[in-house]
Amino acid sequence: MTIFSKKNAFTLAEVLITLGIIGIVAALTFPQLIKKYRYYVLENQFKKAYSIMQQVVLTARYNLGVNSMYEYCIQVDHPGEDASYINSEKCLSALNYAFVKETTTKPWNKDEHSISRDKDSIMTYNRKKVVTEASGLAGLTALWIMRQAQDGLLANFRINGYRININIDVNGVKGPNQLGHDVFVLVIDNKKDMVTGLKQNKIYTDEELENMDFEEEYQKALAGYPCNINSGSTANGVGCGWFAINDINPATGVKGYWKNLP
């Protein structure tokens, strides 16, 4: 007498249902994993770029032979709106030279150090607006003609508003090309020559800005140095540098800048 044993197995329908569930879960979680990985990469690129910029400042100060880069570079010929910075040319030359020296390991042709990105779109912190030189960052800085390091880092320097502005794009012309993500405005504005970031100091609603009087359009865009997930300002993101350096979420004031990028 033959005895048959019964073996348990999944039916085809059960297998298809399981695969369907796995597919749904993957579709929901995979984009988030990619997003988190991208922000992790941007964070590390920023930290590297920030370290380079601090070394660039120290090298430039040494080459200039001054005790304070900040004090030397912001000297003006006379006070007032039409004042000019006496040592700006020397300071900018020293910073550009130091940047090339600190980021170049092999000889480059002169033209390879500069890049024009006038065809690149730079977005605001929350991607609500395209940043333009005329309406977004005029009077503060410019992002369209930059020095290029051999690893792709872009940077330029400008002296304005009693600050030395350092503008960086941590991954070059690659995306997202977005203020507060890979594009940052940093500054040297203290006697210790530490590189820091502009910090959002007041959150204005779009309605408040519309009801305020400004002489120039860019002044409205820069009001409060925005780094706001809701702001429609054309300079939204210029105030993100301090938060990025300190890993502070601008929306909550607690840790987690890079984990909470919009």
Image (cartoon, grey):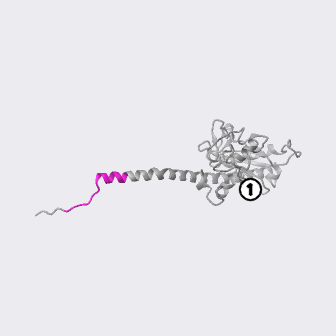
Q: Position of residue 127 (x, y in %)?
A: 61, 44
Q: At label 1, which amino acid type do we have?
A: Met
Residue pictured at 55% horizontal, 50% vertical: 38
Q: Is residue 111 above or below residue 163?
A: above
Picture residue at 15% right of the left edge, 63% below the top: 3
Residue, disc 1: 194
Q: Position of residue 172 (x, y in %)?
A: 62, 44
Residue situated in front as seen by the camera: 221 or 243: 221
The quarter of the picture where residue 138 lies is top right
* Residue 228 seen: yes
Residue 254 included in the magenta stretch of the image = no
Q: Is residue 151 visible?
A: no
Q: Which residues are magenta?
A: 5-19
17 falls in the magenta region: yes
x and y percent of residue 117 in the render?
65, 38
Disc 1 crowd rating (10 Å Cα; few below 14, some 14-19, many 20+) is: some
